[in-house]
Amino acid sequence: MLSNRSIWILAALAIFVPTLPLASVSAHAPTSTLVSTLKTPHCEVPCGIYDDQMRFEQMLEDTATIAKAITSINEFTTNMQGPPTAKGINQTMRWVTTKENHATNIQHIVSQYFLTQRIKPSNERYVDQLKTAHAVMVAAMKCKQDADPATAETLQKAIYDLYRAYEGKEPDLQHDHEG
């Protein structure tokens, strides 16, 4: 059970961390629930805990989801016979929303993680890092604006280019997000 002090801390944090999922934590939850809830978003304290590889993996996974959404949207519109059904419209809207959310997540990772915390002016590759980070954000935006599979391919390439500019080497990613 959360102590009164824990509840006050949680309430105070909600003011400064608007993404904190307060609704999921009850006053009768164990203290471990509070701790696991607080670990969800990455901070800007700075905490010194960084996992660049994980961020690249996440962006590639988001890109794979965007590509799947684009494929599903195009399949629906291509295979449609007669007037659209409510179920078909609903499923298409869900894919559009999924595509938007994953593109936004990529933009968030680039802006909140890489640009505000990791990419430093003192780095000799700073300009290349900024250019490639910007290219990722623009490519993610274009994925929101269109259902052309080429937009997801461009986004994936932009993420790999950011990796090269940021790490200074060819991508060494453990998961293949193709298909």
Image: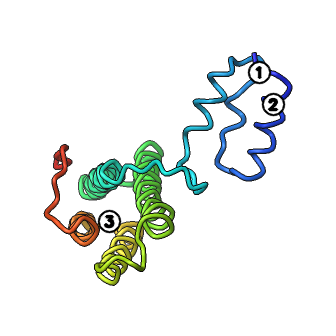
Query: Tag 3: residue type?
Result: Ala
**Residue 32 on image: x %, y %:** 62, 22
Q: Which mark is residue 7?
A: 2
Label 1: element kind? loop
Q: Which mark is residue 147?
A: 3
Image quadrant containing the N terminus: top right
Kindly check if marks 2 and 3 are in contact, taking CB atoms under 8 A apart as contact: no
Query: Tag 2: residue type?
Result: Ile
Q: Residues within 10 Å of mark 2 (few under 14, many from 20)?
A: some
**Residue 34 on image: x %, y %:** 67, 29
**Residue 91 on image: x %, y %:** 42, 45
**Residue 47 on image: x %, y %:** 54, 50
Q: Is residue 16 visible?
A: yes
Vertical placement of 31 versus 175: above or below? Answer: above
Task: Pick whichever of labels 1 and 3 is earlier in the sequence.
Answer: 1
For mark 1, what is the residue? 2
**Residues under labels 2 and 3: Cα distance?**
45 Å
Q: Is residue 6 left or right of residue 158?
A: right
Label 2: element kind? helix
